[in-house]
Image (tube, helix red, strand yellow):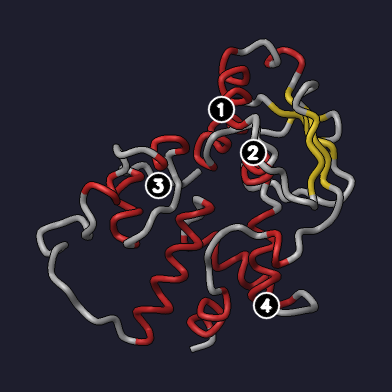
């Protein structure tokens, strides 16, 4: 399975804003974006005005990096969104939001989307009473997700819940932190998506 294996902080610096890829670290003075407010690389400190295409490309890259998706899969999601009734940009965000790794993060069972992806790959979760270890698995309304019985005593979940105990769970999800389970109540609405992406720019980019 292809995935980005480089430094997460380089992605934030390239984007020019925090993408919150490393959980708690992003809220401290250790954050690379706070310490070095310029892009990585030899020419990172040079200032260039982006073209319209560059702005649209940057917006697409932002969405990809927030959700940890590579180009081929992102384009596949876009094609799915374009074939679905409704606004393509909003459909795209709904697909990304309902990925299993994102749902784990949004329920508060992980401190970041990358940590959620790792926990899913390691087989810590059941979906509708079946083990699912595919981060890109798309959740649907009424799906039940729970930490597997053999994983509930893992120290990682105790640490995660201590760190995310006050996290607000979106209205389209229901979380039971005491029993380490959650339910997808409905498909997310646009206002439920907390990723600061202008999806219409992504649609314009792929429409060229």
Q: Name the mark nearer the viewer: 2 or 3.
A: 2
Viewer-nearest residue: 147 or 133:
147
Q: Secondary structure at mark 4?
A: helix
Q: In this rendering, is residue 50 above or below 34?
A: below
Q: Secondary structure at mark 2?
A: loop
Residue marked by disc 4: 88
Disc assigned to residue 4? 3
Residue 102 is marked as: none
Percent across and percent down for residue 195 are 56, 59
Earlier in the chain: of badge 2 and badge 3, it is: 3
Measure the alpha-carbon separation of dots 3 and 4. Answer: 26 Å
Q: Residues within 10 Å of mark 3 (few under 14, many from 20)?
A: few
Q: Nearer the viewer, residue 145 or 33?
A: 33
Q: How many marks?
A: 4
Q: Residue at x 67, y 49 (%)?
A: 99
- Contact? badges 2 and 3 (CB < 8 Å): no
Query: Residue at 62% across / 65% down in the picture?
Result: 77
| Residue on which the image places disc 1 | 163
């Amino acid at each position: 399975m292809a995935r980005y294996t480089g430094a997460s902080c380089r992605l934030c610096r390239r984007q020019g804003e925090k993408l919150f890829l490393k959980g708690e670290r992003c809220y401290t003075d250790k954050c690379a974006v706070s310490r070095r407010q310029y892009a990585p690389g030899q020419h990172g400190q040079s200032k260039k005005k982006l073209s319209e295409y560059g702005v649209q490309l940057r917006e697409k890259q932002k969405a990809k990096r927030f959700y940890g998706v590579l180009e081929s899969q992102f384009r596949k999601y876009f094609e799915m969104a374009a074939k679905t009734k409704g606004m393509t940009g909003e459909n795209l965000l709904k697909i990304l939001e309902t990925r299993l790794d994102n749902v784990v993060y949004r329920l508060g069972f992980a401190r970041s989307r990358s940590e959620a992806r790792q926990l899913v790959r390691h087989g810590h979760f059941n979906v509708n009473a079946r083990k699912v270890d595919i981060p890109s698995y798309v959740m649907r309304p009424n799906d039940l997700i729970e930490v597997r019985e053999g994983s509930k005593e893992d120290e990682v979940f105790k640490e995660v819940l201590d760190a995310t105990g006050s996290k607000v769970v979106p209205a389209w999800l229901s979380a039971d932190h005491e029993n380490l389970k959650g339910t997808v109540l409905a498909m997310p609405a646009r206002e439920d998506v907390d990723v600061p992406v202008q999806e219409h720019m992504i649609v314009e980019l792929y429409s060229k």
